[in-house]
Image: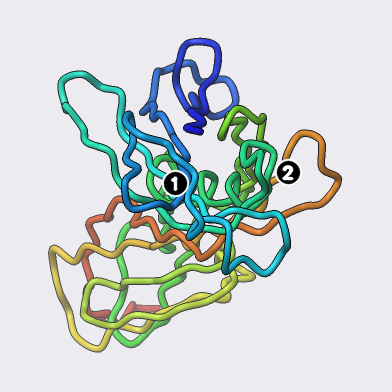
Amino acid sequence: MTITAHDGDGTAYNYSPEGVTTPLAKYVWTLIPACPQNKPGGNDYLCRGATVGCPIAGDLQWRIYYRNLDPALNDPWHLRATQCLARNPLLDIAAIKAAVDKIFHEDLPLPGGTLVVQPPDGALVNLPTIFYTTTTQPLSFTVTALGVTVRITAIPTGYGWHFGDGATATTTSPGHPHPNGDVTHTYAVPASGLSPYVTVVWSGTYTVAGFDEVFDVTGTVSRDGPPLQLLVREARAELIDG
């Protein structure tokens, strides 16, 4: 039995962030029993090998394949995983998780950090420069994975700071503006044309229609933000009459 998961227009999922309607990548998924003679779009025979070796009695070993539906790509089937799933895998949370993990890591438009530097007109040698990002809020996406509606929440949980002079730092804080700046860097020498930027590390959770549990996405996604141009000048002392 080959089970192809799709929504109303024949695609495995079609998603967009809240308020955005730009079409994004679409895939089709298929699951077939893990038997030597089976392949996507071909045989889907059940063999003894697919019925043994699973920890839960009655489960089968399934191969999970996906491909991009863009005709210009002529994309072949890709093996995503071989898993023990229920005999109706479209209702199996493990199969849905494999699809959600792929969407989160490869397809969601998760942004890098928008960097702010204080003082805004450049840094001074031997004085702390404040860095922070305004990319701090969770993002929500509604997707259809294996025919089931899934709500994904992406959460910024870490930040990587690249100060442009080779120095870096990692924090869980997004930094804050003066006077509460908790992410700072002190430049030792004057420099021009530095390009500092901040990387946002996104973690994810999701809920599945029909389930009360909140599930974790496997792993994290890191996205680099656009760099700023920064000038580091040397402070000069001046005597003022009077």
Q: Is residue 182 left or right of residue 206?
A: left
The quadrant of the picture occupied by the C terminus is bottom left
Would you say 159 lies left or right of 214 here?
left
Residue 50 against residue 153 in the figure, above or below: below
Q: Quadrant of residue 208?
A: top right
Q: Nearer the viewer, residue 39 or 215?
A: 39
Marks 2 and 1 sit apart, C-alpha to C-alpha, by 21 Å
Q: State which tag comes first along the sequence, 2 or 1.
A: 1
Q: Nearer the viewer, residue 171 or 95?
A: 95
Give above or below for 69 relative to 232: above
Q: Position of residue 241 (x, y in %)?
A: 34, 78
Give the percent coordinates (x, y) of residue 4. 48, 28
In the displayed structure, 126 sits above or below 117; it is below
Rendered residue at 45%/57% (across/down)? 82
Q: Secondary structure at mark 2?
A: strand
Three-letter code for the amino acid on which mark 1 is drawn = Ile
Give the residue displayed 32% in from the left and 31% down from the top.
42
Number of residues whose C-alpha sits closer than 10 Å to that of mark 2, classed few (under 14), some (14–19) or many (20 or more): some
Residue 64: give its label: 1
Q: Residue at x 51, y 23 (%)?
A: 6
Q: Residue furthest top?
A: 9
Instruction: Please tell me the numbered disc located at residue 172.
Output: none
Q: Amino acid at mark 2?
A: Thr
Q: Residue at x 73, y 61 (%)?
A: 57
